[in-house]
């Protein structure tokens, strides 16, 4: 029972981490290696709004999500747009931006164990004999809502459909009058907001530390690779596979191995089936 | 607004054209035009230990050369074979650990551990990378980025080879002089060796694989074999660097799998000029000392070289070396259209 409950919670948090990465890659084909940095910066911005400026918690969350969206869009508009289409330059440039943000934060004094965000609701309840605190419960519920909301958004709104059109075939989307650069910029914005949402949901459970930026990046890559790059549904299912696998290993083998499992998942998926479980890429594109 | 428009035109210098042909052998001027840049590089590298004062900066020379070897292997793999490997740390770490194990567990002297580490490490890295050789682009980059992280986590989780403490008490080089000249010598050998290699028939096949692997396959050449050979060459170079690093610091540990070793060579390649082979070395000669200067500022140095990297990718994506080569070989003038 414990495995089931905590496996689900872990899976949803992984899905939250990976969703932004999957979205940006799915739409603009940019592997956004600054994803972890966007996650962490949102945590610190929320912390600054809440503790330094003294705004109410809910408002500071909304504001920091806005800041993140702007940051993501600026990143695309001024830097990534110039290297778009060149795979390796995209990786190097976005990773370098991520490094600048993360190490800049570390240099700026954001290190140590002193940065925490309050949980949404204190207390805990029993689910099937396992104690679960309310925050984890809220996180899971909001996570599932967010994922379904995203699905509805991409299937039933005009912008969502435009984004989907671009994800399927950029040339055709261009011909139908969809501004691909604008859409890619929006996608980066949404990706950043999703990273921020994941941060505000997950970070109250522990301290905000810069190192977890790298951790989040690896986890989101793991989720997206296993699920198939560019496939959101795949990312969602992969999150459950990796989430349960992690909980199982930490229960039966040891918590040291959690990260090994994630990285092993990436390596094995790439070797055995590079397009992932639900990948939309054709085999020929990635293999010789 | 004037209707007259000007255009910049680049023309090869006369001396460049002359020295391309047999004329080069007929005059000292042409001969020195050809050999001077190479001579400056070789003599400059060899003279470095005499020019640099202080123990600390003497050590930096060796580190620069190790990074340069790594950057060279990255450049070769990325721009002559078309495999963009972000796993420099994987090569360094494997070589470092093999040298450490051989030296501290089997007490083999550094003279043998370094070549052994290069060959064994090259073989190990090639074996690991072999299954993912058919991958392309982002996929290959991601998987090679994951390998060093994976190795570090495995060593940490299983607590093998000294676990998080690493292997300590490894022999050092017999003197600083030997250490510096060994790495400088290896760097020069690799540089000119790779330059030679890429112009041979084998090198031609490597380049062809990068340009169009399907066509190479269609001509009946086993591309996996060639890619594996290229990976072996590159990873052996990286492993040799790692082995030297282990003997310099008398220690091998998890931090040899750190991302620094993957990122800095790439930054150096981008800055120095991708695909020129000399460029990455120049990039390292600039970047590593600068990042040592900034060591007092802690993580600011990472911010610094990441910013340089972004700047170069955006505005000067051809790098210093290509720019310098153009100035050396061509002159520019404005002409009317």
Image (spheres, coloured by chain):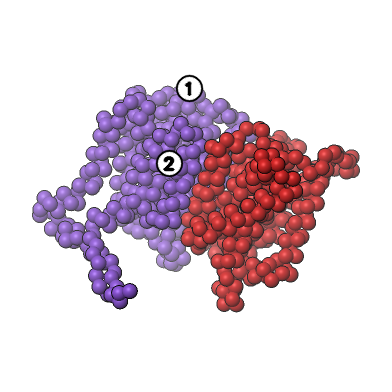
Chain colours: A red, B purple
Query: Image quadrant of residue A110?
Result: top right
- Whether residue A162 is visible: yes
Q: Chain of mark 2?
A: B
**Residue B41 versus residue B132: which sits nearer the camera?**
B41
**Residue A100 versus residue B251: which sits nearer the camera?**
A100
**Residue B86 versus residue A119: which sits nearer the camera?**
A119
Give the Cα distance between marks 1 and 2. Answer: 22 Å
What mark, if any, has residue B169 been given in the picture?
1
Q: Is residue B305 left or right of residue B128?
A: left
Q: Are marks 1 and 2 in contact (CB under 8 Å)?
A: no
Q: Earlier in the sequence, mark 1 or mark 2?
A: 1
- Whether residue A43 is visible: no
Label 1: state its secondary structure: loop
Above or below, A87 against A8 in this view is: below
Label 2: state its secondary structure: helix
Q: Position of residue A177 (x, y in %)?
A: 59, 76
Q: Position of residue B14 (x, y in %)?
A: 16, 61
Above or below, A127 against B218 in this view is: above
Q: Chain of mark 1?
A: B
For the point 35% across and 30% down, the residue is B57
Q: Position of residue B266 (x, y in %)?
A: 44, 47
Q: Which residue is mark 2?
A: B238
Instruction: Categorize mark 1 by other alpha carbons within 10 Å: few (<14), some (14-19), many (20+).
Output: some
């Amino acid at each position: 029972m414990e495995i089931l409950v905590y496996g689900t919670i872990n899976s949803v948090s992984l899905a939250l981490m990976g969703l932004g990465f999957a979205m940006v890659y799915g739409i603009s084909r940019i592997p956004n290696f600054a994803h972890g940095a966007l996650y962490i910066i949102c945590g610190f911005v929320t912390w600054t709004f809440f503790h330094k400026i003294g705004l109410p918690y809910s408002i500071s969350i909304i504001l920091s999500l806005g800041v993140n969206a702007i940051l993501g869009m600026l990143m695309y508009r001024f830097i990534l747009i110039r290297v778009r289409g060149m795979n390796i330059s995209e990786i190097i440039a976005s990773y370098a931006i991520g490094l600048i943000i993360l190490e800049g934060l570390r240099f700026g004094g954001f290190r140590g164990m002193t940065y925490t965000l309050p949980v949404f609701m204190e207390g805990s309840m029993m689910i099937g004999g396992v104690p679960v605190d309310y925050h984890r419960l809220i996180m899971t519920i909001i996570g599932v809502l967010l994922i379904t909301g995203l699905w509805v958004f991409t299937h039933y709104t005009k912008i969502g459909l435009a984004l989907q059109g671009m994800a399927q075939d950029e040339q055709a989307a261009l011909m139908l009058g969809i501004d691909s650069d604008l859409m890619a910029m929006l996608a980066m914005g949404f990706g950043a907001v999703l990273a921020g949402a994941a941060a505000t949901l997950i970070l109250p459970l522990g301290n905000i530390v810069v190192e977890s930026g790298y951790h989040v990046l690896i986890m989101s890559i793991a989720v997206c690779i296993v699920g198939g790059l560019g496939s959101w549904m795949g990312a969602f299912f992969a999150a459950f596979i990796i989430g349960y696998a992690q909980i199982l290993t930490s229960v039966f083998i040891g918590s040291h191995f959690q990260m090994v499992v994630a990285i092993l998942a990436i390596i094995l998926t790439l070797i055995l089936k590079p397009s992932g479980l639900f990948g939309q890429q054709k085999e020929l594109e990635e293999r010789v | 607004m004037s209707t007259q428009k000007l255009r910049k035109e680049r023309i090869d210098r006369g001396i460049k054209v002359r020295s391309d042909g047999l004329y080069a052998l007929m005059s000292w001027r042409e001969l020195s035009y050809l050999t001077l840049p190479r001579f400056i590089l070789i003599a400059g590298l060899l003279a470095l230990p005499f020019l640099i004062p202080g123990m600390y900066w003497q050590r930096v020379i060796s580190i620069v050369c190790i990074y340069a070897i790594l950057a060279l292997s990255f450049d070769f793999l990325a721009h002559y074979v078309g495999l963009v490997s972000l796993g420099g740390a994987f090569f360094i770490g494997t070589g470092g650990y093999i040298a450490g194990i051989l030296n501290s567990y089997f007490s083999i002297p550094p003279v043998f551990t370094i070549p052994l580490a290069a060959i064994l490490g090259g073989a190990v890295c090639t074996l690991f990378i072999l299954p993912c050789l058919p991958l392309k682009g982002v996929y290959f980059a991601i998987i090679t980025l994951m390998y060093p992280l994976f190795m570090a986590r495995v060593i940490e989780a299983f607590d093998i080879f000294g676990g998080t403490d690493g292997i300590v008490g490894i022999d050092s080089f017999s003197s600083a002089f030997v250490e510096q000249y060994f790495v400088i010598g290896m760097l020069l050998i690799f540089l000119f060796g790779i330059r030679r290699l890429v112009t041979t028939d084998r090198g031609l096949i490597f380049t062809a694989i990068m340009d169009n692997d399907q066509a190479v396959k269609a001509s009946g050449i086993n591309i996996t074999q060639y890619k594996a050979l290229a990976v072996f060459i590159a990873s052996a170079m990286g492993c040799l660097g790692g082995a030297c690093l282990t003997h310099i610091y008398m220690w091998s540990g998890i931090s040899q799998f750190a991302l620094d070793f993957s990122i800095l060579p790439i930054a150096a390649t981008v800055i120095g000029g991708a695909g020129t082979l000399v460029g990455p070395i120049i990039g390292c000669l600039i970047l590593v000392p600068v990042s040592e200067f900034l060591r007092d500022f802690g993580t600011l140095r990472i911010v610094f070289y990441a910013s340089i990297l972004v700047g170069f990718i955006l505005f000067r994506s051809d790098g210093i070396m290509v720019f310098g080569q153009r100035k050396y070989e061509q002159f520019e003038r404005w002409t009317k259209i």
